[in-house]
Image (tube, rainbow, N blue to C red):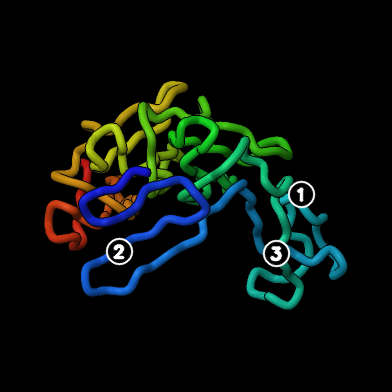
């Protein structure tokens, strides 16, 4: 069981907990295998086949009455336990998901929906070390980036991107001043990546950093 000085228990059991002095204890149930669902047309209403994840079928974009949640591919498609899942779409509208991959040492893995099944983007477990609070985003050219809390760098923030057929760090690994939890990655209109996080170096307040 790993813990950080903010009291977050980083164990990989069925639950994780964070306790704060003088505050209540919060618990969240972890995920075991990864599934993705999306709102698509109800097949009975004349559109799409359940589980193909590729067609919307009938109904307008805003018509919720003809849609229901359908599994994209098979349920539980990850190799094993998947924590800290993050879903995003590339420039062509293809869904991709990033997560901390249990069977691969809790390193980061990204998978995309391709040819009717989920396929890894590069190697599964591509990060140098264990990860949590994984966040996936795409730049305007469709390049995937992943931000995460980096166990190998004192729980600091690290960002990697898919480049030249492999995952490469964006700037220095562990670039935040201190521990960075609950990382969230996004791009501005000019394509600059920003990372927001819970800053262990500054009384666990929010900090935002950008790469430029």
Q: Badge 3 is on which residue?
A: 69
C-alpha gap between disc 2 and disc 1? 42 Å
Q: Badge 1 is on which residue?
A: 52
Q: Is mark 1 on a helix, strand or loop?
A: loop
Q: Badge 2 is on which residue?
A: 19
Q: Is mark 3 on a helix, strand or loop?
A: strand
Q: Which sits in the foreground, 74 or 169? A: 74
Give the left or right position of residue 182, taking residue 107 as reference: left
Instruction: Compare marks 3 and 2 and give the one earlier in the sequence.
Output: 2
User: Which mark lies nearer to you, 3 or 2?
Assistant: 2
Tag 3 and tag 2, C-beta contact below 8 Å: no
- Image position, residue 105 (x, y; %): 46, 31
Q: Residues within 10 Å of mark 3 (few under 14, many from 20)?
A: some
- Image position, residue 153 (x, y; %): 24, 34
Tag 1 and tag 3, C-beta contact below 8 Å: no
Residue occupying image coordinates x 76% and y 65%: 41
- Image position, residue 92 (x, y; %): 56, 45
């Amino acid at each position: 069981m790993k813990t950080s000085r903010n009291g977050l228990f980083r164990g990989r059991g069925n639950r994780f907990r964070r306790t704060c002095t003088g505050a209540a204890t919060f618990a969240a149930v972890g995920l075991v295998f990864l599934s993705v669902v999306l709102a698509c047309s109800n097949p009975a209403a004349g559109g799409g086949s359940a589980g193909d994840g590729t067609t919307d079928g009938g109904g307008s974009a805003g018509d919720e009455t003809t849609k229901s949640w359908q599994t994209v591919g098979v349920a539980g498609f990850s190799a094993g336990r998947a924590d800290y899942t993050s879903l995003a779409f590339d420039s062509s509208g293809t869904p991709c998901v990033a997560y901390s991959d249990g069977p691969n040492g809790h390193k980061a893995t990204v998978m995309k929906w391709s040819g009717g099944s989920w396929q890894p983007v590069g190697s599964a477990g591509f990060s140098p070390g264990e990860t949590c609070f994984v966040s996936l985003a795409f730049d305007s050219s469709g390049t995937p980036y992943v931000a995460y809390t980096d166990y190998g760098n004192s729980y600091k923030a690290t960002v990697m991107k898919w480049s030249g057929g492999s995952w490469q760090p964006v700037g220095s690994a562990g670039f935040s001043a201190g521990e960075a939890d609950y990382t969230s990655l996004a791009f501005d209109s000019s394509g600059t990546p920003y990372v927001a996080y819970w800053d262990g170096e500054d009384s666990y307040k929010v900090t935002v950093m950008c790469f430029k």
